[in-house]
Amino acid sequence: MSEAPASALRRPAQRTHLWVIAVGACALLVLVIFEFFVRSHTGQRIEHAMFHAAEHQRAAFEDGGIAPNWLLNLSIAVPALFFVIITLVRQRFIAAGIAVVTFVAANITTQLLKSTFLDRPDLSSENGVPWLMNSMPSGHTTLAAGAAVAVFLVSGPRQRPLLGFLVAFFATAVGAFTFIETWHRPSDIISAYLVVGAWGLIGGWLIMRAEERWNTVTVENDTSPGGAAGLAWFLGVILTGASALCFLFAGGPDGVAAVTDERQATSTWHWVAGILLSVGPGFLIAGAGINFFDSETGRRMRGHPLPAPQTLKYPVPPQFSHLYEV
């Protein structure tokens, strides 16, 4: 039997260097966000304007609250339910185990970064912004986004685009919730998305390598991430761009300085900017993730066999073959 041409089969996650680059990009973006929003005067002043506006809006709705308190629990319970269903129905036990480890690792990383490695300098005497302890990355957002990404990891290649968009929806809903409730600043939330994204890439590479058959599709019946990925990219660009426009509507640099110098001054535009900035980047990361996972999914020509399960490296001697009979 002649050997099939190499182009007939592309194994999933074959370009490991791209996965390493993607994980490195997530880590680099966390450092960039930290340096600007946490360690610089300008970043601290911008985030104070948004956070101060959120505190003012929350105080105005003290009685009933402006965000449903059940949202955080729902955003974890719904992905957990889907995770269990997919795991049991599709019997994706290896993928489920890796996804659980990924979820735990992302949450441990967030807590280590927040309490050990990322330190917020006290610039209050120089920029007039009250000094607060570091809260980057957001533990609440990491928890919800990690649970949603676990569902994305155990799903099949054809379901991933749609589930990737739903992952972004649940994660960003919690991101907006944590900002509105003044638990975290936008930089905390964005960095949590990136931490989960980095570990999602690591878990995704392991799953694709461990379960090649599940992550290979025929070229004739290929996946199409266009709709879900396009919608995620569209919302990400629009919402992130709109957050910048809100700062212009609030007076630009002068509006930010007014919040810093006059503690009671606040702008609803800064509040809206904080919400949008807590949501938009999440959809951008989701759009990139959907496209990346689709590009790394294995492809084969119709009629070409799926990747065979791993076999023994050396042939079994005939006199011992009966020991391997089932």
Image (tube, rainbow, N blue to C red):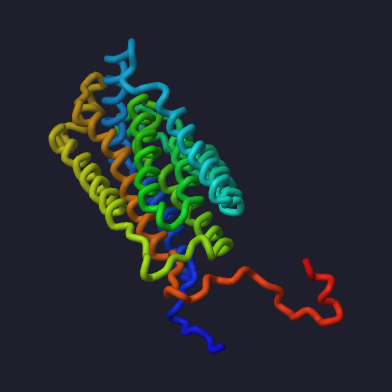
Which of 126/129 is in front?
Answer: 129
Q: Is residue 98 left or right of residue 204?
A: right
Q: Could one spot residue 130 in this view of the protein?
A: yes
What residue sits 48% from the left and 67% below the top? 12
Image quadrant where one finds the C terminus: bottom right
The percent coordinates of residue 90 (x first, y second) are: 54, 50
Q: Residue furthest right?
A: 319
The percent coordinates of residue 79 (x first, y second) are: 47, 38
Q: Is residue 18 above or below residue 114?
A: below
What residue sits 26% from the left and 21% below the top? 263
Image quadrant where one finds the N terminus: bottom right
What residue sits 79% from the left and 70% below the top? 324
Q: Is residue 36 above or below residue 294?
A: above
Q: Is residue 126 above or below residue 61?
A: below
What residue sits 40% from the left and 21% below the top? 69
Q: How many marks?
A: 0
Q: Is residue 82 left or right of residue 251?
A: right
The percent coordinates of residue 174 (x first, y second) are: 39, 33
Q: Could one spot residue 135 in this view of the protein?
A: no
Q: Residue furthest bottom?
A: 2
Kindly indicate the quadrant of the structure image that contains residue 321. Answer: bottom right
Q: Is residue 126 above or below residue 202?
A: above
Which of 301/207 is in front?
Answer: 301
